[in-house]
Amino acid sequence: MIKNSYDRYLKMRQNGDIKLTPFIKIKPKYTDKFEVYKVNNTRFDLLSAKYYNGNANYDWLILLANPHLPSLEFLIEEGTTIRIPYPLDVSIEQYIDGINVYDKLYGL
Protein backbone atom coordinates (compact mmCIF):
# COMPACT_ATOMS: atom_id res chain seq x y z
CA MET A 1 0.00 0.00 0.00
CA ILE A 2 1.39 3.39 -1.03
CA LYS A 3 1.15 6.09 1.61
CA ASN A 4 1.36 9.79 0.91
CA SER A 5 4.87 10.91 0.10
CA TYR A 6 6.74 13.45 2.19
CA ASP A 7 6.89 16.80 0.37
CA ARG A 8 10.59 17.70 0.41
CA TYR A 9 9.77 21.16 -0.97
CA LEU A 10 7.33 22.00 1.80
CA LYS A 11 9.66 24.37 3.66
CA MET A 12 11.07 25.79 0.40
CA ARG A 13 7.71 27.07 -0.86
CA GLN A 14 7.40 30.77 -0.17
CA ASN A 15 5.09 33.29 -1.84
CA GLY A 16 4.28 30.96 -4.71
CA ASP A 17 7.93 30.21 -5.47
CA ILE A 18 10.15 27.28 -4.58
CA LYS A 19 13.49 28.34 -3.15
CA LEU A 20 16.67 26.51 -4.05
CA THR A 21 16.75 23.23 -2.15
CA PRO A 22 20.05 22.65 -0.34
CA PHE A 23 21.89 19.35 -0.56
CA ILE A 24 21.35 17.53 2.74
CA LYS A 25 23.59 14.54 3.46
CA ILE A 26 21.80 11.54 4.88
CA LYS A 27 24.24 10.01 7.35
CA PRO A 28 24.70 6.23 7.33
CA LYS A 29 22.78 4.10 9.82
CA TYR A 30 23.39 0.48 10.74
CA THR A 31 19.87 -0.27 9.49
CA ASP A 32 20.58 0.98 5.94
CA LYS A 33 20.19 -1.45 3.04
CA PHE A 34 22.53 -1.95 0.10
CA GLU A 35 22.11 -2.90 -3.54
CA VAL A 36 24.67 -3.51 -6.27
CA TYR A 37 24.02 -1.32 -9.32
CA LYS A 38 23.33 -3.18 -12.55
CA VAL A 39 23.55 -1.08 -15.71
CA ASN A 40 20.29 -1.04 -17.70
CA ASN A 41 18.51 -2.75 -14.81
CA THR A 42 18.77 -0.76 -11.57
CA ARG A 43 16.55 2.30 -11.23
CA PHE A 44 16.29 4.45 -8.13
CA ASP A 45 12.50 4.74 -8.36
CA LEU A 46 12.30 0.93 -8.34
CA LEU A 47 14.69 0.74 -5.37
CA SER A 48 12.47 3.26 -3.60
CA ALA A 49 9.40 1.13 -4.29
CA LYS A 50 11.20 -2.02 -3.14
CA TYR A 51 12.35 -0.64 0.21
CA TYR A 52 9.63 1.92 0.98
CA ASN A 53 6.41 -0.11 0.82
CA GLY A 54 5.75 0.34 -2.88
CA ASN A 55 6.35 4.10 -2.88
CA ALA A 56 8.59 5.02 -5.82
CA ASN A 57 8.75 8.71 -4.87
CA TYR A 58 11.85 8.57 -2.68
CA ASP A 59 14.51 8.18 -5.36
CA TRP A 60 15.76 11.63 -4.31
CA LEU A 61 16.39 10.35 -0.77
CA ILE A 62 18.51 7.51 -2.12
CA LEU A 63 20.51 10.02 -4.17
CA LEU A 64 21.09 12.17 -1.06
CA ALA A 65 22.43 9.11 0.74
CA ASN A 66 24.94 8.55 -2.09
CA PRO A 67 26.62 11.93 -2.73
CA HIS A 68 29.57 10.21 -4.43
CA LEU A 69 27.34 9.11 -7.33
CA PRO A 70 26.70 11.10 -10.49
CA SER A 71 23.26 12.69 -10.62
CA LEU A 72 22.27 10.75 -13.74
CA GLU A 73 21.66 7.04 -13.26
CA PHE A 74 23.06 6.03 -16.66
CA LEU A 75 26.47 7.39 -15.59
CA ILE A 76 26.73 5.03 -12.60
CA GLU A 77 29.24 2.26 -13.12
CA GLU A 78 28.31 -1.43 -13.09
CA GLY A 79 28.83 -3.00 -9.67
CA THR A 80 28.66 0.24 -7.67
CA THR A 81 27.18 -0.26 -4.21
CA ILE A 82 24.09 1.86 -3.59
CA ARG A 83 23.09 2.70 -0.02
CA ILE A 84 19.37 2.86 0.65
CA PRO A 85 18.64 4.90 3.79
CA TYR A 86 16.43 2.75 5.99
CA PRO A 87 13.97 2.86 7.65
CA LEU A 88 12.13 5.56 5.74
CA ASP A 89 10.67 7.43 8.72
CA VAL A 90 14.06 7.82 10.41
CA SER A 91 15.66 8.87 7.11
CA ILE A 92 12.96 11.50 6.51
CA GLU A 93 13.60 12.83 10.03
CA GLN A 94 17.31 13.09 9.18
CA TYR A 95 16.39 15.11 6.11
CA ILE A 96 14.04 17.40 8.06
CA ASP A 97 16.68 17.94 10.75
CA GLY A 98 19.23 18.81 8.04
CA ILE A 99 16.84 21.32 6.45
CA ASN A 100 16.16 22.91 9.85
CA VAL A 101 19.89 23.25 10.58
CA TYR A 102 20.47 24.75 7.14
CA ASP A 103 17.61 27.20 7.72
CA LYS A 104 19.04 28.31 11.08
CA LEU A 105 22.53 28.79 9.64
CA TYR A 106 21.78 30.30 6.23
CA GLY A 107 18.05 30.92 6.00
CA LEU A 108 15.81 29.65 3.24
Image (cartoon, grey):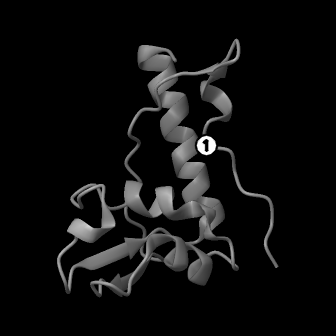
- 1 vs 65: above or below: below
- 64 vs 12: above or below: below
Please state if 58 lies on the left or on the right of 102 as rendered.
Answer: right
Q: Name the image quarter holding residue 96.
A: top right
Q: Position of residue 71 (x, y in %)?
A: 30, 55
Please state if 72 lies on the left or on the right of 16 as rendered.
Answer: left
Q: Nearer the viewer, residue 100 or 76?
A: 76
Q: Nearer the viewer, residue 88 or 18?
A: 18
Q: Position of residue 86 (x, y in %)?
A: 53, 72
Circle 1: element type:
loop
Q: Position of residue 4 (x, y in %)?
A: 79, 59
Q: Residue at x 50, y 63 (%)?
A: 59
Identify the amino acid type marked 1: Arg
Q: Name the image quarter holding residue 67.
A: bottom left
Which quadrant is the N terminus positioned in?
A: bottom right
Q: Residues within 10 Å of mark 1 (few under 14, many from 20)?
A: some
Q: Residue at x 50, y 78 (%)?
A: 47
Number of marks drawn: 1
Q: Position of residue 89 (x, y in %)?
A: 66, 62
Which residue does the numbered mark 1 point to in the structure image?
Answer: 8
Q: Residue at x 61, y 66 (%)?
A: 88
Q: Residue at x 42, y 15 (%)?
A: 106
Q: Name the image quarter holding residue 9.
A: top right
